[in-house]
Amino acid sequence: MRACEKMYERLEIDYKKETDSDFMDGLTALFNHGFFQIALEHESERFRRYQTPFTLALIDIDSFYVYNRRHGHVKGDRMLKIISELLKENIRAVDLAARYSGDVFALLLTNTDAHQALEMMERIRQVIAVKTNGEATVSIGFASHPHDGTEKENLIRKAQEALLRAKIRGKNRIDFISNEASPDTDENPKVLLVDDEPRNLKYLEALLIPLHYDVIKVSNGKDALSVVSKVDIDLILLDVMMPGMDGYEVCHRLKSSERTRLIPIVMVTALDDMEAKIKGIDNGVDDFISKPFNKMELLTRVKTLINVKSLNNNLISLESTLFSLAMAVEAKDKYTSGHIWRVSELAVALSKKTGLSEKRIQEIKFGGIIHDLGKIGVSKDILNKPGRLSPEERDIMQNHPNIGYNICLPLKKTLGMALEIVRYHHEKLDGSGYPDGLKENEIPIGAKIMAVVDIYDALVSDRPYRKGMTNDQALEIVRQDAAEGKLDSKLVEYLIKLVK
């Protein structure tokens, strides 16, 4: 461990000598982005020599853009300093903390695999929420070397993807991209049996193995959670009464986690135990099987729920692909860095003012991430052109909603309002928008919300042909658009209250 600390000390000296600049971020007193990149390379080299694993974590302050707009940059900077101090206090001396960008921090955890990192990140997540009295929460994504990648760029990309998944699925979350095998018809589904009665385990195992299920057996709740954290489980058969942690608590923990909530859980109960079934439903149980077991009933339910899990896996894989494409699009346009995060968070804040359901709000959040996906079909020359676009170039740019819509159309049932946002976020109430020239109530509410926040963020951001406007200048233009009947005036007023 001491050798690792000395290595970082040498890196600090070399960095300052080579760049003739400090290796620390002035505001947070953490290492800066450049030094972090060098340290990451050295950690990769150390693995090649000594085979010591390490984990890269990216930590993003939830809705910090909204927080800054609401409270001002002075208070925002103060919050950055508070969180940086909490990070330093909750990592080891051999680990490294850096300010990766804006409101994103990076941690380099030496000699740490994914499961050890998960415990550390959970502690950090909770500490930040408690110490800031709930004013700030963080989303965390991480990837481990060598499990998730051995190349520096690939590891960063995996951590970014994990962070994106954490943010998309709600604030105050942790996620990591596990290097799971892709779906393969030759790979047997994995069934976890949890029961403190050995005879039940043997009986269930005898039923399942002939049908080509891989069976894992444990006798208590703690071991069940440990297995699920390490293995991609397709189904859990869970007994209610066990020593220590009972089946309800196991189910509650699994269903409360984004990583495990989609694993089907079948609770094993007595035939007439209605109270146990009601309590199980409250804790998220997917189905029940009664003792004594009916063989055909058991096997039918196992097969059905494993098929459901397979479908969910496919949907998650497709969502992750869309997230990756959205990030690739943003990387093409150097002037829109962070745009998808900002409009997504602002859209969510605006949606809550309108009284939409939580399901719709999540669809709008997702729509904010993928709304410009169609720009994957627009060249970098047009996206980064320093002057105004020609009529031909404008036609190409204005076709991006069509391109994005066609890419996402196969997921129509899954995306819901997010798909409408992709196609209609440039429509205007007076019919002057594109691509379909919709008017008033023809435009879905999600697209109306996205139109307001998309325009506002574009105005306050730098563009190839102009500098970003001040908050007041941008709001005045948005207010004028509402007065002219282009934007929803009520949504604009909500936006003004949010950012002022």
Image: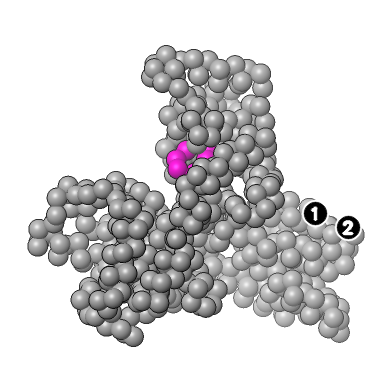
Instruction: Give the residue type that dot 2 points to.
Output: Gly
Residue of label 2: 244
Q: Position of residue 7 (x, y in %)?
A: 56, 18
The reply, left or right, for residue 437 in relation to residue 37 is: left
Crowd class of label 1 (few under 14; some 14 to 19; many from 20; radius 10 Å): few
Q: Nearer the viewer, residue 100 or 195?
A: 100
Residue at 68% in and 74% down: 286
Figure check: 101 above or below 68 = above
Q: Secondary structure at mark 1?
A: helix
Relative to 99, 381 lies left or right:
left
Q: Is residue 27 visible?
A: yes
Marks 1 and 2, the one that precedes in the sequence: 1
Secondary structure of the residue carrying numbered label 2: loop
Residue 55: image x %, image y %? 57, 37
Give the magenta range.
100-106
Q: Determine whether 365 is above or below 442 in the image.
A: above
* Residue 189 picture location, percent across and down: 62, 62
Figure quadrant of the C terminus: bottom left
Q: Nearer the viewer, residue 345 or 409?
A: 345
Quadrant in the rendering for residue 108: top right
For the stretch drawn in magenta, the main secondary structure is strand
Circle 1 sits on which residue? 222
Residue 103: in magenta span: yes
Disc number for residue 83: none
Would residue 110 be visible to someone looking at this image?
A: no
